[in-house]
């Protein structure tokens, strides 16, 4: 039998096809991989690269100074501070300026300025933003105080009118007696106003009127003979009698030295204090 022909040798295995990105700069291929692009599909890579290009194009032409990069969590204090300064925050708390901000015409209190600077610096607030917010806050306080004062003044006027109706023709006389009571209690102008804010105008003057009236003791006239008052009660009676005399009261209100000196001596005897100046201040409250 003839011999069988030998089998031809097997063809060597085909070389694997080159990657589609063969020849591309390895750094770029590495960047694609770091971005998470699917390197097995050139179409997907093209889509992702196109998206990134569109995003980048939005900033093309913007100056470098207008582009900010958020600092990383690991950034040091200097880097974070530089970032916030580009957004308008001053380098130091003293950079916040409140020179042009006034509260009811006066400069802001140093303690308030220190507090505003501290919190503004802590939250990296832009300088101009802090100034405008402070102006708005101060205006709110001014409006609140103005409304509160107007309300208090209206209430005071209402209570004074009620007291005038109640005391009638004795209003001036009773008010004088009330002022003497206030001086005897050691009240000054500021204290009297503060007390009025609590219990009201009418309540204050009624209270001190009762106090002043309670200081009367003996009568000034004894046996039909008028003499210098010996006690505080007699001095009070003399004051009451003088202010019941329209002619004397007219001369007193005109500043006659005789009448004013007599009133001063009597008042000092009633209250135990030099009362003329304090009387003038207390009188302005009513």
Image (cartoon, rainbow, N blue to C red):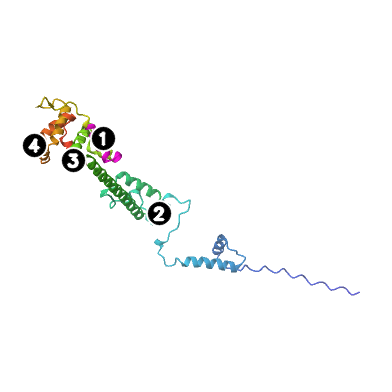
Whether residue 118 is situated above or below residue 269 in the rendered picture: below
Secondary structure type for disc 1: helix
Secondary structure type for disc 2: helix
Secondary structure type for disc 3: helix
Please identify the residue farthest to the front as the structure is shown.
Answer: 224
For residue 84, which numbered disc appears in the image? 2
Which stretch appears magenta? 197-212
- Mark 2 is surrounded, within 10 Å at the Cα level, by few (under 14), some (14 to 19) or many (20 or more) other residues, namely some
For residue 257, which numbered disc appears in the image? 4
Q: Using the rendered image of the protein, determine whether residue 22 is visible from the camera's viewpoint.
A: no
- Mark 4 is surrounded, within 10 Å at the Cα level, by few (under 14), some (14 to 19) or many (20 or more) other residues, namely few
Q: Identify the residue under disc 1.
A: 207
| Number of dots carrying numbers | 4
* Mark 4 → mark 1, Cα distance in angstroms: 31 Å
- Mark 1 is surrounded, within 10 Å at the Cα level, by few (under 14), some (14 to 19) or many (20 or more) other residues, namely some
Whether residue 6 is situated above or below residue 279 in the rendered picture: below
Task: Name which residue lies at 14% across and 33% down.
Answer: 241
| Mark positioned earlier in the residue sequence (3 or 4) | 3
């Amino acid at each position: 039998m003839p011999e069988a022909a030998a089998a031809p040798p097997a063809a060597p295995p085909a070389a694997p096809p080159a990657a589609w990105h063969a020849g591309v700069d390895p750094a770029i291929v590495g960047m694609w991989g770091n971005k998470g692009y699917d390197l097995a599909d050139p179409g997907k890579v093209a889509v992702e690269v196109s998206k990134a290009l569109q995003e980048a194009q939005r900033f093309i032409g913007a100056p470098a100074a207008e582009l900010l990069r958020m600092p990383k969590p690991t950034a040091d204090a200097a880097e974070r501070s530089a970032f916030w300064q580009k957004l308008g925050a001053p380098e130091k708390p003293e950079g916040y300026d409140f020179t042009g901000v006034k509260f009811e015409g006066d400069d802001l209190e140093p303690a308030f300025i220190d507090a505003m600077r501290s919190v503004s610096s802590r939250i990296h607030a832009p300088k101009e933003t802090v100034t405008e917010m402070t102006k708005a806050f101060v205006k709110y306080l001014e409006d609140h105080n103005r409304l509160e004062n107007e309300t208090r003044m209206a209430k005071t006027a209402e209570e004074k009118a009620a007291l005038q109706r109640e005391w009638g023709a004795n209003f001036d006389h009773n008010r004088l007696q009330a002022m003497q009571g206030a001086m005897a209690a050691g009240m000054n102008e500021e204290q009297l106003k503060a007390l009025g804010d609590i219990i009201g105008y009418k309540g204050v003057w009624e209270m001190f009127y009762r106090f002043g009236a309670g200081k009367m003791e003996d009568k000034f006239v004894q046996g039909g003979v008028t003499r210098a008052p010996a006690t505080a009660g007699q001095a009070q009676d003399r004051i009451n009698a003088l202010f019941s005399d329209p002619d004397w009261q007219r001369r007193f209100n005109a500043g006659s030295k005789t009448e004013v000196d007599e009133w001063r001596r009597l008042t000092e005897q009633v209250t135990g204090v030099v009362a003329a100046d304090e009387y003038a201040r207390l009188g302005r409250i009513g």
